[in-house]
Structure formats: C-alpha cells, structure tokens
Amino acid sequence: MRFQELEAYNPVVVQCHDNPDADTLASGYGVYCYFRSRGREVHLVYSGRTRIQKSNLRLMVEKLNLPVEYVAAEEWKGMPEGGLLITVDCQYGAGNVTKLEAGNVVVIDHHQVEKPPVHGVINPNLGSCSTLVWKMLRDEDFDVDSVEQLGTALYYGLYTDTNQFSELYNPLDMDMREALHADKSLITLFRNSNLSLKELEIAGIAMIRYSYNDDYEFAVIKAQPCDPNVLGLISDFLLQVDAIKTCVVFNEVPDGYKFSVRSCIREVNASELAAFLAQDIGSGGGHYEKAGGFISLRLYEENFPTLHTEAYFNNRMTQYFDSYDLIYAREFQADTAGMKRYRMRTIPMGCVKADDLVPAGTSVTVRTLEGDSELTVDGDLYLVIGPKGEVYPDSRETFSRSYRLLDQRYTPEQKPEYIPIIKNRADGSTLFLTDYARVCVPAGKVEIYARELERSVKVFTVRDKDRYLLGKPGDYLAVRCDDLHDVYVVERETFQRSYDEVSS
C-alpha cells in the first residue's frame, strides 16, 4: 500500500495509540504532513484514559509544534462519509488504542499482527514506525526536509523506540537515522528530560529483585511499567556486575512485553539472543552488545497460557545457552569422516573491488540486511554479493582461488529485500554496491567438506575471532578441502542452490 492510494479520502484522521510515546507521535505527524501537503483536511489525535504527561513528550509536542489533539471516546462523533481513519504504531481494535468507530480504516505499524485481517502496512522487522512512515514518504518523493522539525520528530521516534539506537538492527532504520536532518540540540533537551523520580525508584527496586543463573552467568529482572529507556538503564547497570555476563530486563506494556538485552561476551550476540527470546511471538534485535524487543500479549497467551513471564524468560535464556556448540576455527581441526565433498555451482554472483569505489585507506561501512560491517579499504579487498544481497569480504588471494571475474555488469535475478550499500565514513557518501558490481563465477578449483547441522553452532572463523557465524539446524557446516581450519556455515537454502555433491 502507498499513500497515493489513499488520496481519494477526505477528511483524514491519524490516530496515535493511547498514552502516546515519541514514535507514535512522530510517525503520526509524518502521515499528517503528507495528507496536508495534498490539500486534505487532516487531524492528528489520540485518546485513552490519560493525556500526555511525560516531560520529554510534552517538550516534544511543544518544541516541534505537533498539532496533536486529545479526543475522549465519548466525544467521538464518528467519521464523516468518505473519510479515513489511519492508526499509526498500533492496530485498530487492539488493546493499546481506543476504538474510534470508522467505516474506512488503514493500519500503519511495526509490531506483530494483532487483529487480522489488516488493511494497510505492517513491518515488524523495523525498529520504529517512524522508519516505516519515512520509507512511505520517500516512496512518494516527499521531501521530509520541506517540513520544519519533521526530521527531528522522526529521528526522536526512532531514537526512543530503539533504546537510544542500541537496539537498531534493520538497515532501513540505519538509513533513516543517517538521512534525516535533526535538530540535535532539541534531541539533547528531550533526552535529558526523559527520566522521572518515579522511574528512578522503579530502577532501584528492580535491581534488588533479580534472578541469577550461576551455570550460564545470566540475570533476569522484571521491572514495573516504565519508559523503555529505563529498561536499558537497568540492563547497562547489571552488566557492571562481575558475575553477570548477559542479562534481560523486561516489563509489561498494554499490548505485551518490552525487553532489553545486554551481553559482554563474544560468545553471545545480544541481537541474536533478543530474536531468540521473541521467536514466533514477537520481534527482537539490535547490536552485538545491546539489543531489545517486544513480545505480543495475544501471541504469548496463545502459546504460554499458564506460564508466568519470569519463568518464560528464565527458561528461554537457559534453552538458548543449551542450544548451540562453539567452534574456534584457529584451534579447530575438522573431522571430515562424517562429511561429504561438494563443489560450488557456476552461479553468477556480483563482485566489487573496494578501492574502485573509494580510495585505499578509507574507513567504510558495508550495510546489508544481515547488519553492518566496518572495514578499511585496501587494494586486496573484494566484496562478493550473493543472490539475497548478502556481502562476503574476501582478500585478493582468496577471491582469485575461488572466483573468475567477468567483464559483465552484475544484475541480481531477483531484487533483494535490501540492496547492500557501502558508506564512506569520512565524508558520509553512500553508494549502492549493485550499481558497480561485475559478474563473478566460481572458479571450480575449491571444494569443501560439509554436513547438515542437527543443532546450532557458532563458528569463530580464522578471519574474525571476535564475532561468530551462526548456523542453525538444517544449515551446513563447511570446511575447505585445502585448509581444514577454514571453517564456516552456509544457510540451508543458499547451500542447496549453490553446491553439488562430488562423486567419489
């Protein structure tokens, strides 16, 4: 769905969820600005039992001149014929938003589907609804900078919903953060008005009511209802304790549970752990050390109707640590007796020689759907692009042994969900890798041993001893035949599409 498909409606009412936060206000304002620019009568509203009270949100409304109105449910007179109600950062009829009767309703949200069927756009992989609205505005060639303070509003919406960017994991979230021209002085003002004395008390009480797992050195804390940033504050403090290596802090919100995750050991990627905690009942992600997520109340009660939440998080954390094996490739000697031999098919892939795009010595960020990689360009760095937009950095030597570079422009067979970019960290310029990629094909010289995984494995490769590759059951553990220390994992679908077994 696109905004232009909704331009036939008039008037338009944009509804934030009850007890609004910064993200619903910002995303609602973005939708408001679009329809106002199209000459529609448009209103930005919220309802519920209470009006906006938090000091940072009152400042946000005041300083950004947000035209938000409070509408009591009993005063709602209904939507005129031909009008449209758009709920942002929430879903019509869900528990966190007052149901204002309307004939035509559209949902724009970034949470799990609560009330199917839904007409609108829902993307639970995004860190904020502000990002979704920004993308929809961009798709309509709407200039966000043409509206004073809209960029600041969207930036602050993302900032708060990702716990000060510590739970930022989707590349679109990162793209928006870098594209917006926000008033940083106002962001600083809002940020430093975010914690009340009551929330300080909540943090203190929470930290004396922890549960601790001695075997895996993790802690779990349930906090009273509070701003999500308070969860991050508690998590950061917990990790200062010498005996705690990972932790999760959570609390109840009207439609589910918000949680914050921290890790200070290389064997646990906080983003991956957050996704594991929310698997099938919510969404989670972030960075290697800091992450967070949301669990849908409806999905939780459907799947765990008799399990209280403290037990769920403790059980799930234990399941996570029990679920994987560790491989440190530098010390690992693969046992190939139970592995079969494979050769990569001649499937066209993309390749960019990094110093053809930016000068050698430049620090860059390579951004893909899987995350960011921070690299320094040199004459030996090649970037190989897979069919899903994944990017594999290779040295000249490894690339030459594995691929043949063709004098032919690379075009993906199917447009990836996210097109990988390379960002020059010195001047901020951004290039789409596929615009400069040439075709490369496997040279047929390198064969691998591989076996299907029956349980998860984390592999610290010879090229990266600080961060691991995660292989899940059904994926493949692979090792180069000519170097048994070169161990890595290949996702199941990619492996089956890319490799043929070598006959004995």
Image (cartoon, rainbow, N blue to C red):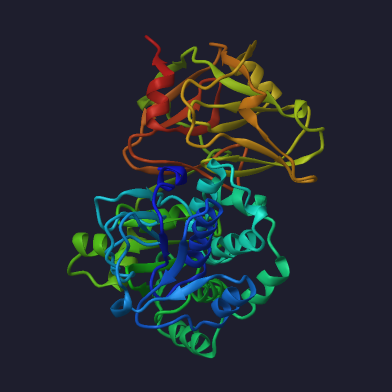
* Towards the viewer: 472 or 126: 126
165 versus 485 height, above or below:
below
Query: Which residue is at a point 47% across and 52% down the rendered structure image?
Result: 126
Q: As drawn, which residue projects farthest toward the left?
A: 306
Tell me residue 324's x, y (percent).
Answer: 39, 48
Viewer-closest of 212 and 276: 276
The quarter holding residue 219 reads: bottom left
Q: Residue at x 50, y 34 (%)?
A: 488
Q: Quadrant of the N terminus?
A: top left
The location of residue 336, given as percent across then percent down, is 42, 26
Task: Judge whether residue 17 can be spotted in this image.
Answer: yes
Nearer to me, 218 or 69: 69
Residue, x 53% and y 45% (percent of image)? Answer: 468
Instruction: Indicate whether 463 appears above or below 126.
Output: above
Quarter of the figure with the C terminus: top left
Give residue 402's position: percent from left, percent from top.
Answer: 59, 18
User: How far across and how far down the image is residue 19, in percent?
Assistant: 41, 76
Q: Residue at x 41, y 70 (%)?
A: 214
